[in-house]
Image: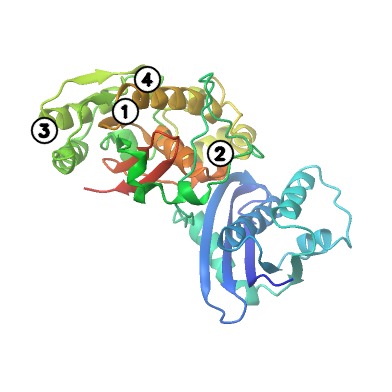
Amino acid sequence: MTGRRLIVEADGGSRGNPGPAAYGAVVRDAESGAVLAEVAETLGVATNNVAEYRGLLAGLRAAHGIDPDAVVEARLDSKLVVEQLSGRWKIKSADLEPLADEARGVFPPGRVGYTWVSRTENAHADRLVNQALDGKPVGAAAVHAGPHLAGPDLAGPDLTEGAATEPAGPANRLAAWSPELGPPTTLHVVRHGQTAMTAARRFSGGGVPGPSLDDTGLAQAERAAAVLGGCGAVAVVASPMVRTRETAAAVARRLGLAVRVDDAWRECEFGEWEGLTLAEIGERYPDALAGWYASTAYRPPGGESLDDVARRIATARDALVAEFPGQPVVVVTHSMPMRTLTALALGAPPETLFRLLPAPGSVTELQYYADGTTAVPAFGHRP
């Protein structure tokens, strides 16, 4: 084996076992010890063991993104995970077997070795776990271009775990530098400004018209309008919710355009979770919350799945690209649609949806070329 040598330090933990859980992972260069990547994310309600496996998965995937031919040493303070993936202990839990299979599949057989370390030796990853549980996740994603995934039947992409994506070839990775492709359709995607629900970190979905922007949200809308005043957009499209129409009105005034409302750009419908905080959902619906974090196909009680959201957003995106080839368009929408568009443009794995955290009033720029190539010049810019 001649690949680069990398070290993955991974950890996971649950406050309650099961309870609110998170993972953390670090990728280092084996020779210099330099940190090449960090990632930490919450998992909703899960067990310690599931969190440990998810930390390992995140670390291996980050290492694979750095060098798919690398030789990796995975260091964990979980004796269970190390022994199971080293083949010395049998996996008895139905929850862990699929995670173990995923871990084995990130790199070819023989390229990953597992080492047990003490918690003290795994302090960096442990710190990332607690950082995520305290509300400060760390995302690590490489921005690259590749064909977007919606097919000609407009059924939309499959964001479920294990879904195949076409890797970006050399030409696609250089799309933004290739004048032969012609100008792209550029979507300037704006998340609505702050509302009282946003400030309270309560789920505010697409099934309820309100609330309106608060004073902070109105100011954020005006700042987004100022940033987009020179973008040359030929249309402003908004979700039908009050908060998006109010944000879009500020942008449209600056651009001298009318607002076109499109129901497809509404927020994910959260059903019985509407108006609740994540902590309240975890207390009242622990199994449902775990299911939602585990699979993009899972529907909250009375709501829609993230796959449902992806299908309608991909259809709406493709309609705009077809209607406005090579032109800029402003889309005023919500957090989940913005995350979905970005994940699709990057060809990113499902868990990316929970790592991308666009701020209220922020602007993301997405480019769509005639050959299907995509690029992400800017994400979550705060005016």
Crowding near the residue tagged with mark 2, few <14, some 14–19, many ≥20 C-alpha atoms within 10 Å: some
Spatial distance from mark 4 to mark 3, Cα to Cα?
28 Å
Residue at the (16%, 20%) spot, across then down: 258
Three-letter residue code for mark 2: Gly
Left or right of 314: which side holds 7? right
Label 2 secondary element? helix
Left or right relative to 106: residue 223? left
Q: Earlier in the sequence, mark 4 or mark 3?
A: 4
Measure the C-alpha gap from mark 3 to mark 1: 23 Å
Q: Earlier in the sequence, mark 3 or mark 1?
A: 3
Dot 1 amino acid type: Pro
Q: Using residue 49 as the reference point, say whether residue 230 is left or right of it.
A: left
The numbered mark at residue 208 is: 4
Label 1, on which residue?
A: 325
Mark 3 residue type: Arg
Q: Can residue 200 be seen in this view?
A: no
Sequence-earlier tag: 4 or 1: 4
Label ID, residue 201: none
Q: Nearer the viewer, residue 121 or 34?
A: 34
